[in-house]
Image (cartoon, helix red, strand yellow):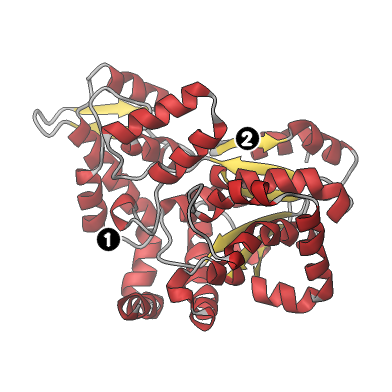
Amino acid sequence: MDPEEIIKLILREPTEEVLTVDRLRSHLEEGCDLRHYIGFEISGFVHLGTGLLCMQKVADFQKAGIKTTIFLADYHSWINKKLGGDLDTIKRVAGGYFKEALKYSLKIVGGDPERTQFIMGSELYEKRGIDYMTNVIKVSMSTTLSRVRRSVTIMGRKLGESLSFAQLLYVPMQVADIFSLGVNLAHGGMDQRKAHVIAIEVGEVVGGYKPVAVHHHLLTGMNIDEQTRKSMLLAKESGDRDTFEQCILDVKMSKSKPESAIFIHDSPHEIFEKLRKAYCPPREVELNPVLELAKYVLFRDRKHPLQVTSKRTGDVKEFSSFYELTSAYAKGEVHPLDLKLAVAKELSNILEPAYRYFREGSGHRYLEELSEIAITR
């Protein structure tokens, strides 16, 4: 594939940033094989941000002929006290529900799970042994404690929050993962930026190369409120990246905040109820979680117009692009409830394969297991 076509796929939304496009282009022009990875903590149910947006980019990388890897970060999850901080439980969920959920998500967005390598963190560490520990030490010697403390936002922790010493190891471990896996294209949400920047800065010392980093958009949680929205917009306008990244943690869709998230195996009724309650201010198009779902999920590969029916009059409006929809919404030509109903219907159709498998098929056992774990914690 032509290098510019590959770059186009990598830059395609939901990508928000590539560090850097010039380095990416140089790799391609030099004929360097790109090796991708994205890592996930193992915790609760997989929501649309993890399942669909992350996997959209994995599918894009596959289309570009790039080898893709999904890293199931069991030790990181243990350090960050996920699933009660029980490593055996984390490993079981990683190889069961979580892996299956990501596979189904990848299928939904047009990717091929068979072309993606799934690697458990503990397996990598056992295989690499002293080499991995050496990389952790190299990273730690090449950065500072204050830099690590500022980077704890990658694990969903706030600046200044009390941390165990093990949690301070999280950042250098994540950076070391990149070089121990031998990947040169690190992928994650915008909340992972700090770790990837460190990887780029220390890359020559640790692995002898600087990786490319690709960061995608983080979906806004359904439960955002007006005050939080305004704070986020002010932080964005100010150019203060630390404050902005902190705000991202507050507004993003998160499995730890079930009211903020739509899960890939939610029923049509559950999807409708979550969207019905979602924040969706009239005429406001920025940081509107319902419109975000339309942009990043419904319109991404859409081949036919989106229909929005007026609950009051029964009139049907058709929108062939997200731009048309936002323009009409900003003018007050689309009512928030009508938008919610249209998005709920479309999402239910898109997620039906995952719903059928996990709620009505053989995948039900994975949900039962994870539910039992949550109940006992």
User: Residue 59, relative to residue 312: is it above or below?
Assistant: below
Residue 35 in view: yes
The residue that appears at 34% across and 64% down in the rendered structure is 355
Mark 1 or 2: in front is: 2
Residue 302 in view: no
Q: Position of residue 230 (x, y in %)?
A: 34, 28
Sequence-earlier tag: 1 or 2: 2
Checking the image for residue 267, the label placed there is 1
Number of numbered callouts drawn: 2
**Depth order, front residue of 168/207:** 168
Q: In what element is the residue under mark 2? A: strand
80 left or right, relative to 306: right
Q: Position of residue 222 (x, y in %)?
A: 31, 45
Give the quarter of the figure containing the C terminus.
bottom left
In the rendered image, which quarter is residue 225 located in?
top left
In the rendered image, which quarter is residue 38 located in?
bottom right
Q: CA distance from mark 1 to mark 2?
A: 33 Å
Give the quarter of the figure containing the N terminus.
top right
192 left or right, relative to 43: right
Q: In what element is the residue under mark 1? A: loop
The residue most toward the bottom is: 88
Answer yes or no: do the residues labelled 1 and 2 have beta carbons within 8 Å? no
The residue that appears at 53% across and 58% down in the rendered structure is 106
Q: Position of residue 248 (x, y in %)?
A: 46, 41
Checking the image for residue 98, the label placed there is none
Q: Disc 2 residue type?
A: Glu
The residue most toward the top is: 331
**Depth order, front residue of 120/328:** 120
Q: Disc 1 residue type?
A: Ser
The residue that appears at 51% across and 63% down in the rendered structure is 102
Kindly identify which residue carries mark 2: 17
